[in-house]
Image: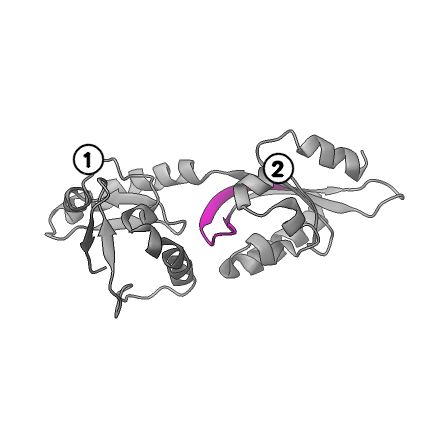
């Protein structure tokens, strides 16, 4: 199958289908990739895949996986990708070397399925079993989010503080709890935090506001 046929077939898949040169440059970017990652085909084609969607702390992993793909022909793994807006998502990745014959050089086909929701629910079940009693014993509202910024636990105090029903926050983006004007900056702060995690007040020196479900705002310290 030539590369044009692969690109045509990829347009029918909802998952992100990306065709890469052996050097990691985007040769084809499917409609599913546009939806998953936020970059148009025009923006992505010709760019280095790592620069577009691979978080800094996953760059070495990505290079290792491409090398392994070239060595064995096809592999599958779970990883994290970065959208155009800076938010993160979990993906199940399958990569395969495509050799179209002497007419075209080999390429790497990467099929990437967004499994963020599935992983969030799995993490939520684990964290709830481990920490629920502890979190419920504290007077403050506590929210635990995973590296993609999705809430895995919110204790009763946090649910009341933000006006949500029990369990309603689970799986939602933590950015939902901030007014719109803070969200874009918060995505960047959160992603950078997971690259270099350490205990600190995220809002130190800033005037912050929380956003309740009914749309009202209130001053908050994080």
In which quadrant will I find the N terminus? top right
Instruction: Please state which of residues 126 and 180 is positioned toward the viewer in this rendering.
Output: 180
**Are there few (<14), some (14-19), or many (20+) residues within 10 Å of tag 2?**
many
Asked whether, in this view, residue 37 is left or right of residue 17, the answer is left
Q: Which mark is residue 31?
A: 2
Asked whether, in this view, residue 28 is left or right of residue 220, the answer is right
Write down the region rendered in magenta.
80-94
Element on which disc 2 rests: helix
Element on which disc 1 rests: loop
Chief secondary structure of the magenta portion: strand
Instruction: Please state which of residues 163 and 130 is positioned toward the viewer in this rendering.
Output: 163
Residue at 62 percent across and 57 percent down: it is 63
Q: Which residue is mark 1?
A: 166
In which quadrant will I find the C terminus? bottom left
Q: Quadrant of residue 6?
A: top right
In magenta segment, residue 92: yes
Instruction: Please state which of residues 64 and 20 is positioned toward the viewer in this rendering.
Output: 20
């Amino acid at each position: 199958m030539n590369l044009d046929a692969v690109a045509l077939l990829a347009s029918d898949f909802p998952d992100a289908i990306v065709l890469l040169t052996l050097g990691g440059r985007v040769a084809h970017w499917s409609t599913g990739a546009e939806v998953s990652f936020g970059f148009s085909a025009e923006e992505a084609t010709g760019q280095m895949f790592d620069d577009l969607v691979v978080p800094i702390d996953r760059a070495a992993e990505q290079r290792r996986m491409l090398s392994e793909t070239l060595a064995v022909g096809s592999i599958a793994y779970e990883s994290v990708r970065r959208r155009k807006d800076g938010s993160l998502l979990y993906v199940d990745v399958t990569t395969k070397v495509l050799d179209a014959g002497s007419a075209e050089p080999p390429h790497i086909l990467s099929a990437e399925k967004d499994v963020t929701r599935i992983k969030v629910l799995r993490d939520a079940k684990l964290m709830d079993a481990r920490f629920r009693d502890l979190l419920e014993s504290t007077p403050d509202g506590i929210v635990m989010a995973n590296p993609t910024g999705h809430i895995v636990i919110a204790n009763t105090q946090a649910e009341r503080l933000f006006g949500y029903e029990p369990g309603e926050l689970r799986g939602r983006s933590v950015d939902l709890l901030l007014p719109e004007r803070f969200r874009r900056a918060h995505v960047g702060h959160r992603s950078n935090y997971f690259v270099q995690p350490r205990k600190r007040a995220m809002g130190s020196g800033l005037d912050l506001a929380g956003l309740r479900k009914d749309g009202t705002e209130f001053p908050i310290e994080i």
